[in-house]
Image: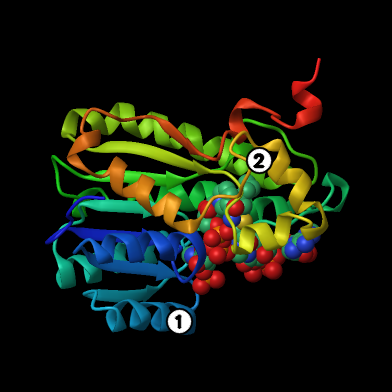
Amino acid sequence: MGDFSGRHVFVAGASGGINFAIAQGFGAAGARVTILSRSEEKIAAAAQELRDAGVNAIGIACDVRDYAGLEAAYTQAVAAHGRIDVLISGAAGNFLAPALKVSANAFKTVVDIDLLGTYNVFRASWDHLTRPGASLIAITAGQAVHPSPFQIHACAAKAGVNMVTKCLALEWGPAGVRVNAISPGPIADTEGMRRLADPAREAKLKGSLALRDYGTKADIAEAAMFLSSPAAKYITGTILNVDGGNDIGDASADALTM
Ligand code: HXC
Ligand code: NAP
């Protein structure tokens, strides 16, 4: 999906999972890549894996809740790879718990990582973006618009992520900066699915999706590359569902039978 040779792609929350796959996708398409996450050990290993695959990549350890740390990370990344052409904000935390078991600090922790973290990642990037031309993408979730039991913290946080995306798209569009979000559906072989989905209910969940299967990490990487390609130059402020039809409703045989 496109040629990103010479482009600098910065992915926050990318020591593994979907966001690392996004970094791999852009790297395979020729981009210079910076990845960032909290764990020094994990991000160093992930950056090494990219370099082993021939990608010009660096890894930076930083918590997206640390605004000053992000400013320093951008300075370091731009010194290594030049101005940022594509910026992905995907750091997230989640766990299943009923509201009565979610302390104020637990709620705040997830909001701080997902919502404030996305604000920080985007806000602190301004001086380092290619302007005009930069593509910013938040990784949100269907829970932003569909309430879900036992995820009050993540639903609230991701709802905010959608609004940060749209508000920044309005403000930064005149400078030639596009801001979009990708909303993945259930993606196979991810930490998110390990935490949220009961393997015993896999067939039922797949059967409720219009496209009858989980997505892949590569599906999300392809969507990010599309949104950052010239083909998407007139797209901003959108929440792109890459979810097998999860957003449109229950497509199980029972639901479709009148
Ligand atoms: C209730 C919990 C809890 C749980 C932690 N807490 N786990 N409460 N049930 N299972 C509470 C703690 O008791 C504490 O509150 C508060 O949360 C902060 O916990 P810490 O461990 O100090 O936080 P921290 O070290 O910052 O870790 C953040 C984390 C952790 C979110 C809790 O799980 C994490 O690092 N996750 C990152 C990886 C991850 O979650 N990936 C999946 C993303 S899936 P008290 O009151 O005791 O101080 C995803 C899918 C999207 O996002 C779809 C949904 C939107
Ligand atoms: P994951 O593997 O746990 O990815 C989360 C990443 O964020 C990790 O690399 C983690 O690395 C990093 N991170 C967490 N907290 C951080 C912080 N405070 N500062 C910096 N980095 C932090 O989860 P995933 O399942 O691939 O999910 C990736 C994204 O897709 C998330 O935004 C998630 O909400 C979204 N999503 C996933 C699914 C799904 O099916 N999995 C569905 C919908 C949406 P460190 O531990 O090294 O910090």
Q: Is residue 202 above or below residue 68?
A: above
The x, y position of residue 231, in whole percent, is: 21, 36
Identity of the residue drawn at 77% across and 54% down: 96
Determine whether, in the image, residue 66 is placed left or right of residue 146. left
The amino acid type of the residue labelled 1 equals: Glu
- Disc sitting over residue 40 in the figure: 1
Q: Is mark 2 within 8 Å of ligand 1?
A: yes
Count of marks placed on residues: 2
Q: Is residue 60 above or below residue 161?
A: below
**Front-most of residues 195 and 216:** 216
Determine whether, in the image, residue 220 is placed left or right of residue 99. left
* Disc 1 element: helix
Q: Residue at label 2?
A: 155
**Front-most of residues 15 and 51:** 51
* Disc 2 element: helix
Circle 1 Cα neighbour tier, 10 Å, few/some/many (<14 / 14–19 / ≥20): some
The amino acid type of the residue labelled 2 equals: Cys
